[in-house]
Image (spheres, helix red, strand yellow):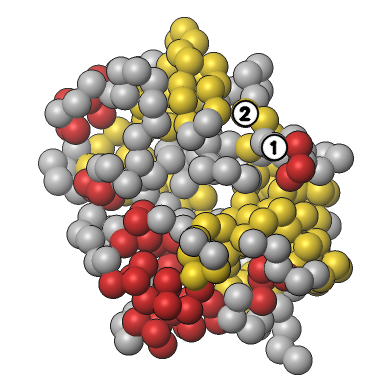
């Protein structure tokens, strides 16, 4: 049987903006360190994503010594978001059914994004003082919180699942369409849906639920163009009930560090629950 191992690791520091590819990552109770702790919201505090603004793909990120660089590909403007950036007053924000008290990010970040997007927006940060709790049935003894991810802290997909979609689509699929945190090689297609508990190094993750997908996967993660055929092809092979699934969502059970090349041990397996 092929060895299961981590082939890629990604974080998305600002929700729905560009990804950062990492060789290793620290696992915290809210997910991978640095993943989706920032988010753009509108004047009412409602979260903004590529679902309604596919042009958010114009913002690409790169790592710097103390934070990361945000570059707007349309205008060429760049701005560095320091990990020690000053935070301002609290703002109640809405992400799906959750309402969370986040902190405004200062250093003119809201103004910078507002000017470029031609819409009044605010950059906010999730803080430990006002956590975003996940549903009780998905909590572990260790983790009861998430980031600004759509639902649960960590999304894992397999290379084989992408390849099954590519076979159906007849075209290559950019891995970032599905916003994965961890990509695993060596499995069968969609086998990750059956992993109730896995271990990588000293990290242990609880497989809470498969991930239902929406039109976000039709957005090209670099170009912002729409390819509806991706979701159509996925629905042909992964429609269960009235939802379409791709990837498994995990919640931390033991913290530590994961790295590309780490072997995955499936500790508990079960029939997938959709």
Can residue 119 be seen by looking at this rendering? yes
- Reading the image, the residue beneath label 2 is 132
Q: Quadrant of residue 39?
A: top left
Depth check, mark 1 against mark 2: the one in front is: 1
Would you place residue 92 above or below residue 49 in this image? Answer: above
Q: CA distance from mark 1 to mark 2?
A: 10 Å
Q: Is 158 left or right of 200, judged from the image as shown?
A: left
- Reading the image, the residue beneath label 1 is 135
Question: Tag 1's secondary structure?
Answer: loop
* Quadrant of the drawing holding the N terminus: bottom right
Expressed as whole percent of the image width and height from the top left, the position of residue 168 reads: 39, 85
Choose between 261 and 166: the one closer to the eye. Answer: 166
Choose between 12 and 62: the one closer to the eye. Answer: 12
The residue at 66%/68% (across/down) is 193
Expressed as whole percent of the image width and height from the top left, the position of residue 219 reads: 29, 58
* Quadrant of the drawing holding the C terminus: bottom right
Q: Quadrant of residue 264?
A: bottom right
Question: Tag 2's secondary structure?
Answer: strand
Would you place residue 38 above or below residue 54 in this image? Answer: above
Would you place residue 78 above or below residue 226 in this image? Answer: above
Q: Is 263 left or right of 141, judged from the image as shown?
A: left
Expressed as whole percent of the image width and height from the top left, the position of residue 232 reads: 34, 71
* Direction top: furthest residue: 89
Can residue 66 be seen by looking at this rendering? no
The residue at 47%/83% (across/down) is 163
Choose between 74 and 41: the one closer to the eye. Answer: 41
**Count of numbered circles in the view:** 2
Expressed as whole percent of the image width and height from the top left, the position of residue 60 reads: 31, 48
Q: Residues within 10 Å of mark 1 (few under 14, many from 20)?
A: few
The residue at 15%/28% (across/down) is 118
User: Are dots 1 and 2 in contact, CB under 8 Å?
Assistant: no
């Amino acid at each position: 049987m092929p060895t299961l191992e981590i082939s890629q690791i990604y974080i998305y520091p600002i929700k729905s903006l560009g990804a950062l590819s990492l060789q290793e990552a620290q696992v915290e109770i809210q997910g991978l360190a640095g993943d989706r702790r920032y988010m753009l919201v509108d004047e009412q505090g409602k979260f903004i994503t590529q679902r309604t603004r596919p042009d958010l793909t114009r913002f690409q990120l790169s790592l710097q010594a103390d934070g990361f660089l945000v570059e707007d590909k349309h205008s060429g403007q760049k701005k560095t978001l320091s990990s020690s950036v000053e935070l301002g007053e609290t703002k109640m924000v809405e992400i799906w059914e959750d309402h969370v008290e986040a902190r405004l990010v200062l250093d003119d970040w809201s103004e910078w994004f507002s000017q470029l997007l031609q819409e009044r927006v605010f950059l906010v940060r999730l803080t430990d003082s006002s956590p975003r709790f996940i549903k009780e049935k998905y909590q572990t003894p260790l983790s009861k919180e998430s980031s600004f991810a759509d639902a649960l802290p960590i999304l894992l997909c397999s290379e084989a699942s992408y390849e099954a979609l590519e076979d159906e689509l007849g075209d290559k699929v950019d891995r970032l369409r599905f916003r994965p945190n961890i990509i695993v090689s060596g499995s069968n297609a969609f086998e990750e849906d059956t992993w109730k508990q896995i271990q990588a190094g000293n990290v242990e993750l609880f497989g809470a639920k498969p991930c239902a997908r929406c039109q976000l996967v039709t957005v090209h993660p670099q170009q912002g163009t729409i390819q509806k055929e991706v979701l159509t092809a996925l629905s042909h092979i992964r429609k269960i009930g009235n939802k379409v699934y791709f990837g498994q969502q995990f919640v931390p059970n033991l913290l530590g560090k994961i790295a590309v090349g780490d072997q995955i041990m499936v500790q508990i397996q079960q029939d997938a629950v959709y």
